[in-house]
Amino acid sequence: MNGDDAAEREWRRMRFMRNLVWIIPVGMVLGTGLFIGLGFLVSWLWSVTLVDIFRIKAISFWQAWGLILLSQILFKAHIQGRMGTGRRWQHGRHGRGMWGQRPAAETPPPGQEV
């Protein structure tokens, strides 16, 4: 390990520790604002679309958060890994393509079984 690397790492650690005094409160305020804003946004969107179109009853803030959590459970439950442009995404887990087919380089010629 290079001495300059260790000094740089220590300087960054000390700077981060010094900035924690304001990073934590700002993060808490932003997190709370995001929580409240997202709940009211979903509630408002429900009210302006579904109530007017289908005459469905308006929902409360906590019901909106219930819908957010339910949608997370339903729509993100079976996602494996992260989508990207890397080799793993292009060829799947075991050298298979995105839908289970083999990559073009490994496809056997017609009439030849694997």
Image (tube, rainbow, N blue to C red):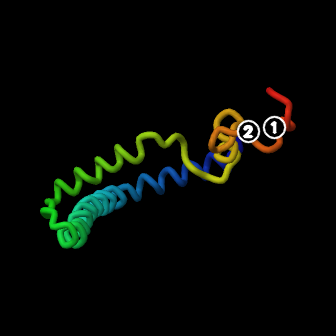
Residue 106's label in the rendered image is 1
Amino acid at circle 2: Arg
Disc 2 element: loop
The answer to which of 98 and 73 lies nearer the viewer is 98
Could you say which is closer to the camera, residue 31 or residue 109?
A: 109
- Relative side of 43 to 95, left or right: left
The quadrant where residue 108 appears: top right
Question: Is residue 48 or residue 42 the one in the foreground?
Answer: 48
Q: Residues within 10 Å of mark 1 (few under 14, many from 20)?
A: few
* Residue 73: x %, y % from top left: 34, 43
Residue ID for mark 2: 102
Look at the image and tell me in which quarter the C terminus lies. top right
CA–CA distance between discs 2 and 1?
6 Å
* Image coords of residue 96 (percent x, y): 69, 37
Tag 2 near tag 1, CB within 8 Å: yes
How far across and down, in percent of the image, does residue 1 sit?
70, 40
Circle on res. 29: none
